[in-house]
Image (spheres, grey):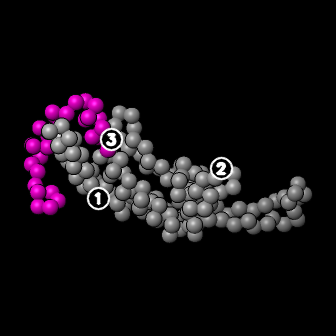
Amino acid sequence: MNNGVEIDTQQVLSMFSELTSKERKKTFKLSLRKSANILRKQVVSNLKSVVKDVNTKNRWNQKTLQSGVRLSVEKDSQSVKVHILGDFRLKFFELGTKNRYNEKKKKVKLKKERYTGSNKANYYFKNAKTQTEQQVFSSLEQSFTDIIKKINDKHK
């Protein structure tokens, strides 16, 4: 499809049927991972627009906010998951928080509640999904074809 080369779907399917089961599984896994990386990169770029510095390490576990955006391919190689629960703080930037108040300070009850802030919902993950949905699915088919061709060329 690139460089003026067209490939028939029947030809791709026949190449796929010639592969061993291990190579088929690898093909699915690689194409899913490659397509899901598009979403992961978009989530990180949307997060950068919300948070000042996503690459700063925190004090208690030395991880960055960017490392909390995770991608995993399931063992059956039929599905892939991109999520933001690798770092619990990302949830608060996505969904926001309600107004919070302190009633005590150093175990002493305050006369009046003290307002400690809130975060507004930014929905950076939700927006990234809608922005890249079409691109991910079109990339899936293209990467599947490319990987099959690459494995087939390797055997010849």
Quick one: SS at disc 3? helix
Q: Mark 3 sits on what residue?
A: 29
Q: Mark 2 sits on what residue?
A: 61
Q: Which mark is residue 109?
A: none
Q: Quadrant of the N terminus?
A: bottom left
Asked whether 138 or 16 is in front, the reply is 16
Q: Amino acid at mark 3?
A: Lys
Q: Is residue 45 left or right of residue 108?
A: left
Spatial CA distance of label 2 from label 1 is 36 Å
Residue 7 painted magenta: yes
Asked whether 151 or 80 is in front, the reply is 151
User: In the image, residue 77 lies at what x, y percent?
Assistant: 34, 37
Q: Earlier in the sequence, mark 1 or mark 3?
A: 3
Q: Earlier in the sequence, mark 3 or mark 2?
A: 3
Name the front one of labels 2 and 1: 2
User: In the image, residue 118 lies at what x, y percent?
Assistant: 65, 65
Asked whether 156 or 57 is in front, the reply is 156
